[in-house]
Image (cartoon, rainbow, N blue to C red):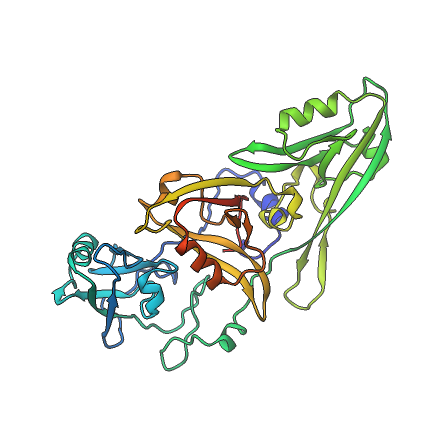
Amino acid sequence: MDISNVPHNYALRLLRQPCRMLRLTVLREQKFRSRSNGQALDPCGPRDDSFHVILNKRSPEEQLGIKLVRKVDEPGVFVFNVLDGGVADRHGQLEENDRVLAINGHDLRFGSPESAAHLIQASERRVHLIVSRQVRQQSPDIFQEARWRNGGSQSPGPGDRSNTPKPLHPVVTCHEKVVSVRKDPSESLGMTVGGGATHREWDLPIYVISVEPGGVISRDGRIKTGDILLNVNGIELTEVSRSEAVALLKSTSSSVVLKALEVKQYEPQEDDSSLAALDSNHNTAPPSDWSPSWVMWLELPRYLYNCKDVMLRRNTAGSLGFCIVGGYEEYNGNKPFFIKSIVEGTPAYNDGRIRCGDILLAVNGRSTSGMIHACLARMLKELKGKITLTIVSWPGTFL
């Protein structure tokens, strides 16, 4: 049963059906493996003619800003990552997955990343690389990393990207509401909540998991499954743990005032442009089956972000150790900055609090909203000493 493009609740109902054996077909993303039929790329596959890349360091100690790795299915040394603002990034010729055939005349066709790093460190200012770049025809991968022309060359033009099928992410709308209910002092409100600070390593808002049929909340009808509770009788719930929220809700007397955020998701349809509402109390799923989709968190208003400040210390030569994607684009508008990757052994990696997929909201108190990618990359590259990053982590990302 194909669940590659279905609403979250539908997949949950399938997984909860009783059965003796559950067989799952999964996609595990590996950086350099072909995702077509699970087969590894042919090590003798076609490659373009090799080309030369000459990088000039400003000092012998300066890093090139590239992460080199080996593959499990092909000999040699490959570019895993090009760090924003580094020497290689400024030069603009190296790309991820390029194979490094030689450095300063030393053959690396069967070499290791360690030997390549030694050759780079030993060079004074000029590093001469011979590089090859693989070319393959477009395959029916689940995730396409690039589009290819019929002639076999990569098509980098923005016009081609507009034809790439876009993922059908649900559209999320939110609006606040204030609900007053009355009950007996000993009577329960009749709802179950989830989320809260440090909820399974994530800081989430308090949200309604289910509403008990016939209870106080159910009889009133205005608080629904999926609503986010902002406060109860004027006491904020936005940064409390689940147990603290439950204690506050249980301690209410006969008059209860709840401020909530109603969240609705609309599922884009493949056959037309209409949006099918996925109401919180969806008809086809029992209320107890409801759980939030990761898209929901990303679309919440900013005041519900549980931000954290991460302070990194950077010396004059090294990189902070992470790459970013996003920023303002002329045709796509303002996009958040996501942490794309983190390099082992760097300040960001050693700190341990930054994760791939985190949203970078501010640097040293300056908001990143509205900044273009090149501007933020340059600012991160030029900052020295103590650097404070304001980030938010959600259990999911558009990356």
Could you tell me which residue is drawn at 56 percent across and 33 percent down? 199
What is the x, y in percent for residue 271?
Answer: 66, 68
Quick one: which residue is furthest to the bottom in this view? 151
383 vs 315, left or right, is right
x and y percentages locating residue 106 in the rendered image: 12, 64
Image position of 282 (left or right of 348):
right
Q: Position of residue 66 (x, y in %)?
A: 30, 58
Relative vertical location of residue 386 with respect to residue 139 in this rendering, above or below: above
Tell me if I can see residue 355 in this picture.
Answer: yes
Between 368 and 191, the one lying in front of the other is 368
For the residue pair 62 and 162, the one nearer the viewer reads as 62
Residue shown at 57% from the left, 36% from the top:
203
- Does residue 267 lie above or below 44 as drawn? above
Q: Residue at x 58, y 47 (%)?
A: 294
Q: Is residue 214 visible?
A: no
116 to the left or right of 181: left
Q: Residue furthest top?
A: 186
Q: Position of residue 128 (x, y in %)?
A: 19, 68
Figure quadrant of residue 387: top left
